[in-house]
Amino acid sequence: MRSVPHDLRILARGRDGRAVLALPGDDGRPVGIEHMDLDELPGRLAAVERAEHPRWVWSDARDHLPRLLAAGVTVERCHDLRLVHQILVHAASVPSDDRAALLAAAAWAVPIAEATAPEQEGAAALFDLEATGRPDQVPADLDETCAELSRQLRAIDGAQDPSRLRLLAAAESSGAIIACELRAAGIPWDVAEHERILVEHLGPRPSPGAAPARMAELAAEVREALGDPLLSLDSPPRLLRALHRAGIDVSSTSKWELEGIDHPAIAPLLAYKRLSRLLTANGWAWIGGWVRDGRYRPVYVPGGVVTGRWASSGGGALQIPRLLRPALRADPGWTLVSADVSQLEPRVLAAMSRDGEMARAGRGTDLYAGIVAAGVVATRQEAKVGVLGALYGGTSGDSGRIVPRLREVFPDAMRLVDRAAEIGEVGGTVSTWLGRSTPPADERWSAAQRAAHQVDATSTEQERARRSARDRGRFTRNFIVQGTAAEWALAWMALLRQELAAFEPVAPELAASGSGPLFSRRAHLAFFLHDEVIVHAPLSQAEAAAAAIRDAADQAGRLLFPGTEVDFPLDLAIRERAVKD
């Protein structure tokens, strides 16, 4: 390992179950070791945080931070070894020897755990420091924590562009803190409004094992239309056979196949499917499992998608249906400040490629409208279809017609994604702006490509290989843009969190008690969805929170793309409920 930054502090778990604080030495061995009981940790860590403002190094924020948050303590910044390991082990800019060393540390290559709805009394145990047996738990003892830190610092220092990887590691690690804080603070949730919506669409809450009234009515309509009075609509094989008997020639019961078919069974069947999804994903059982103390507390998973986007392994925070948005309701005396970025991915593409024409098309305005104004297409819808086709590799229909025009007007942007697709089609690796790289093509894919180029390859093998190559090209084309957009969003949230932390607490009588000891008296992040944030703020801090959101977006653009012409305008609103007018 080269030199170790002097601002690092290690938090680990001792073999005796106690907490351990230490400094990393230049030789990779810990120095200045302190052991303490877990109930002593919040106070001691808070004292170090105030005095030194270190970057905490730990195995996984989820192993340590929830206990601290429950005690009203958080940290300004960290280096999350689990998340950074996942980045570096595939990063094309890291020397192969360093990647091999990371790969050899197999205990750090952990799968993402799937969480289930916690019981009310045991919810805190999901990410407890003392929890054992979690399928994605990484080594947390002091020696292995220091060894992994040494491997990671060596890999970053030796990278082709270490400054970008350092920024990515910092942003990803900030995301780990934010994910834990979002769960601790929770999303203000109006259970009465949620139940009102359920009753409106499903009917009164049914008895256990029974279907809601509206679903039962729709099921009866479908059975009558298909002539099968005993049909179970929740059994895809039986439903498919019933459709076939009725002369409806479909290969699945997917709504994408059923939509547009002219038969009296289809409309009630599609309506039944929509209500079944609402009941299963966000019905009364969901309320009981995920909402407590007036807060919905989902489990976010930073880096849960290969591009770096977040996932959710419990509670479905990234899939809240628009129908339920009115249930996101601020506490009395508080408000929700929501903001989403207009056309984030196309703007990121313009910034990455330094395409001046594309940047100017969106400057201070709707990017799609700007493309229309540039004379590329006649309507905003055509502009949207064309840009999405460029990002996702659309080659037919309207996309196939419009994308060639975009190549003429925005050559730098299109050259960037076209080149990424070409690399992917031959099994190559591409990287985001800050250095997250695609995993290598798996051996089955590579073997199929090799076989298709043999002299005795059949036409079927060749066509299958071409199709899979195009699929991988579409993946790599989108990877660089979606992944870079995720990096911008991480920077946006990290900078916003920093600004909100400086807000003065409001008076105790104005506290939003459901948000916990750390966030009950000041504006804080409450929700995140790819290109959208919601801040829960006292009414007196609403305008300041809105300004902080705008400022953080501007800073994120300058941080990732210094000197760019691209701006990142926000659709921002201050309202009691998170629902657009």
Image (tube, rainbow, N blue to C red):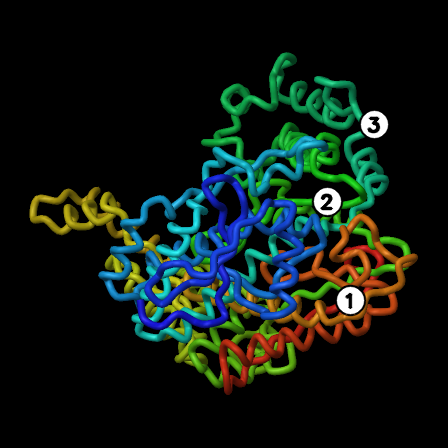
Name the one closer to the observer, 190 or 281.
190
Label at residue 296: 2
The image shows residue 72, relative to residue 390, as above or below, that is above
Q: Residue furthest top?
A: 230
* Residue 99, label in figure: none
Q: Which mark is residue 573?
A: 1
Which amino acid does the dot numbered 3 rest on?
Answer: Pro
Q: Earlier in the sequence, mark 3 or mark 1?
A: 3
- Disc 1 residue type (three-letter): Ala
User: Which residue is the site of mark 3?
Assistant: 204
- Residue 477 location, x and y as percent? 39, 63
Q: Quadrant of residue 360?
A: bottom right
Name the image quarter holding the C terminus. bottom right
Earlier-in-chain disc, 1 versus 2: 2
Looking at the image, tell me whether mark 2 or mark 3 is earlier in sequence order. 3
**Based on the displayed image, in which of its 4 quarters is residue 580 positioned?**
bottom right
Pinpoint residue 136: horizontal percent, then vertical percent: 46, 41
